[in-house]
Image: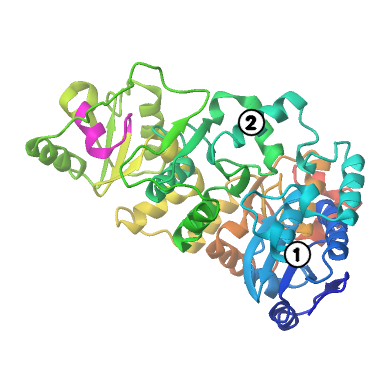
Amino acid sequence: MASGGAVRDVGSKAELDAAVAGARAAAVHFWAGWCEASKQMDEVFAHLAVDFPHAAFLRVEAEEQPEISEAYGVTAVPYFVFCKEGKTVDTLEGANPASLANKVAKIAGPASVAESAVPASLGVAAGPAVLEKVQELAQRNGSSAAESTNTGSLPDTLNKRLEHLVNSHPVFLFMKGTPEQPRCGFSRKVVDILKQEGVNFGSFDILTDNDVREGMKKFSNWPTFPQLYCKGELLGGCDIVVAMHDSGELKDVFEEHNIPLKPQGSKSVEAVEHEAPSGKAGAVSEPVLTDAQKARLASLVNSSPVMVFIKGSPEEPKCGFSGKLVHILKQENIPFSSFDILSDDEVRQGLKVFSNWPSYPQLYIKGELVGGSDIVMEMHKSGELKKVLSEKGVIAKETLEDRVKALISSAPVMLFMKGSPDAPRCGFSSKVVNALKKEGISFGSFDILSDEEVRQGLKTYSNWPTFPQLYYKSELIGGCDIILEMERSGELKSTLSE
């Protein structure tokens, strides 16, 4: 089946399945009327349908067709799915006309384009209709036709620097800290996965350069870190990388892009621009622990269900990181034991090797390393720390109702929404965020897409079936319609500041 140059709106999953199954090549655009980027990309999509008349071009309104969106894992718009012979072969999230044209050409273009080892440029991939539309959009957005629409607001020098960074290695990671010393749990997870995959990768510590940190958010149209790139293309953040790794898709991507995989145990990381001091070149032998040392360290880490190795004591910590960790454990009312690594250099040096963790403090739960102060802080903020402790049987398991109550009371004004205030993932959430910002009301938020248990539990707790939900001093105010009505009547600000 060919689309004949027209985009077809799809009204059901059965209709979409039939259309995809009946087409040699198909592209599906998930969009939303409230999203400006969706509208712009829809124009590009329509012109691609003209340039590639033998492919099926299908359009789904994401929020009106939740069954289809859920089936294809759509959590943000614009989002594109590319199918060949009835099977999904690629996806694209975000507003990037060049990538859209390239991916369409890969499934629908002539063999000289689709089979090329080098990614097609926009000019090669797209026909005259889409080129004209991309140039028009670029001019409308105040950027050159050669630039991606999401980098037009960056200074030219910074944009060139970021382009150089993302293309400096076939696989490149923007992270907090370094591969040897990650400064957040999410960065550590991605580093561990890349090491498991045996991939050689470059990295940049975004904590060392705020221009790069803020610039990459715009450059990639991705608000958080870490960010993983392959051959200059953003793969995603921690959750996406973990999911791709677990499914085997990550290895497939590396093989598809001819990324060499190293044997287990070989060096696979290279820091960029902010490397560790020189003088460590050449073969460096790893310290080897004796059986007696291993036995002593194993005994220490298992000497208490919750064990911390810190500088100083809980009453008198001798470094800020140790003090921060102790404070979190006390705040959570978690019973723990401690060991002062300043009092025993053999333990201090040996534990670095034993745990493969180079710094202090170190937190262990039931003999397993959790991490240092930054990771524990992150787990504390997200509620993951208590969850791990309850799963390990260290503290009584927190009920879902207890967790929901704690989240509701975590800020005077608390919004449960789809996405984040900076990147809402549904029109209703976006409207409520805009209303609160317009009134100058500070508020906390929770992305219900990130936790299905909380999402369902909140519906029961509040007896309110939809999202967003706004709470003030732990009392439900209402959803989108109520908030907008309160804004129009002038009641919103006064109600939320009583």
| Mark linked to residue 30 | 1
Percent position (x, y) of residue 463?
65, 69
Q: Is residue 468 above or below residue 258?
A: below
How packed is label 2: few (under 14 Cα within 10 Å), some, or many (20 or more)? few
Horizontally, residue 210 falls left or right of residue 5, namely left
| Viewer-closest of 330 and 130 | 130
* Residue appearing at x 78%, y 80% in the figure: 1
Percent position (x, y) of residue 17?
69, 80
* Residue appearing at x 62%, y 42% in the figure: 232
Considering the numbered disc 1 on the image, is that residue within a helix, a strand or a loop?
strand
Q: Quadrant of residue 106?
A: bottom right
Whether residue 342 is in magenta: the answer is no
- Residue occupying the far left of the picture: 292
Horizontally, residue 132 falls left or right of residue 467, namely right
Residue range in magenta is: 349-361
* Quarter occupied by the C terminus: top right
| Mark linked to residue 248 | none
Q: Quadrant of residue 326?
A: top left
Label 1 vs label 2, nearer the camera: 2
| Viewer-closest of 444 and 235 | 235
Residue carrying label 2: 164
